[in-house]
Amino acid sequence: MLNSIEMNTPPAMHIDRSNAPGRSESDLALLATALQAVSRVRGDQAFTAWIEHELQQIFPHGGVLCGLGRVSGQKWTLHRMFVHRFPVAYVQNFVSPQTGEFDCPFLNQWSKSREPLLCELGAADRATVAEVPRIRHFGIRSVAIHGGIDDVFGTGHFMMLTNHVAEPNSRQLLEFLLPSAAAAFLRIAAELPQSPPRTASKLQGWQLTQNEIEIAGWLGQGKSNADIAKILGKSNNTIKHQVTSLLRKLGVSNRVQAAVKLHAIASAEPAVPPGEGQS
């Protein structure tokens, strides 16, 4: 079953002006505002506002679909979904009632290259041309998509924007915005209740302390260090050290990767063995 949700998170970013898309100071100012705003998002309503204002200003579009789920090859099974002005019937049309796989031609095409994909239906290649009549039925004229896949744990996330206004720097801009937008989506996704919640029991073999297991639960729900410190009645410095230890034991370098890995551990059946696939 798909859960319709909305997005949220990372820290403020320094913009490297030599690599940032857009040449004018006003372009850079809009980009900086968008990145700073998404880092402060808390909850689905705030993310919706970010999409309607900051994202719309910097990357004009019609609708947004974000997904999180299991990935096997190029086959996706969505576990969490965020929809904003996106035709839900489109998603339902491409979800197999037998397997639950989301057989979206654009997502399948992106999964091959994993590079930002911008596709105009009038210029669709052979991978999508057969689906053009069905896609146009939903009012979709163009698609921009990017995301990330963890091959070790078989999980992935993506962000798809429809009917975008094509610009020379659109692909670069999508690649620049995606990490912050994806972190926001993962944070909101983690706040949804698991059915059943199995993260704590599946972390027992990861050599975590009881405090780290407890922190992992709050980290998976997108809580900041300050939030966790207030909840557990500890200092920010103590939580910071415990989070650092938790990330090291999970074999990840940041909170976004930790959220994805915790989701994979909770969803895995059987439990993912500690150290499996780690370098």
Image: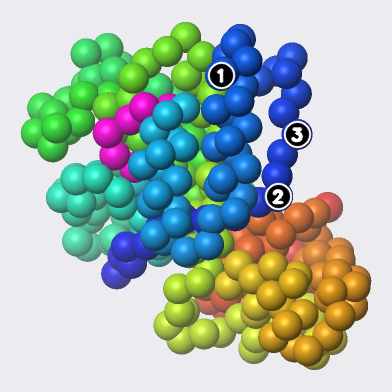
Question: Which residue is at 75% across, 88% downward?
Answer: 232
Question: Which residue is at 37% across, 16% downward?
Answer: 166
Residue density around tag 1, few if under 14, some if 14–19, many if 20 or more, within 10 Å: some
Asked if disc 3 and disc 1 are in contact, CB closer than 8 Å, the reply is: no
Residue that numbered label 3 is attached to = 14
Type of amino acid at the residue the image marks with label 3: His
Question: From where the camera sits, is residue 177 visible?
Answer: yes
Q: Which quadrant would residue 252 be assigned to in this image?
A: bottom right
Residue that numbered label 1 is attached to = 27
Residue that numbered label 2 is attached to = 11
Residue range highlighted in magenta: 59-64
- Residue 181: x and y, percent? 53, 45
Question: From where the camera sits, is residue 73 visible?
Answer: no
> In the rendered structure, which disc, 1 or 2, sits on the residue that comes first in sequence?
2
**Which numbered disc, 1 or 2, marks the residue closer to the eye?**
1
Q: Which quadrant would residue 243 be assigned to in this image?
A: bottom right
Type of amino acid at the residue the image marks with label 1: Asp
Label 3: state its secondary structure: loop
122 horizontally vs 228: left or right = left
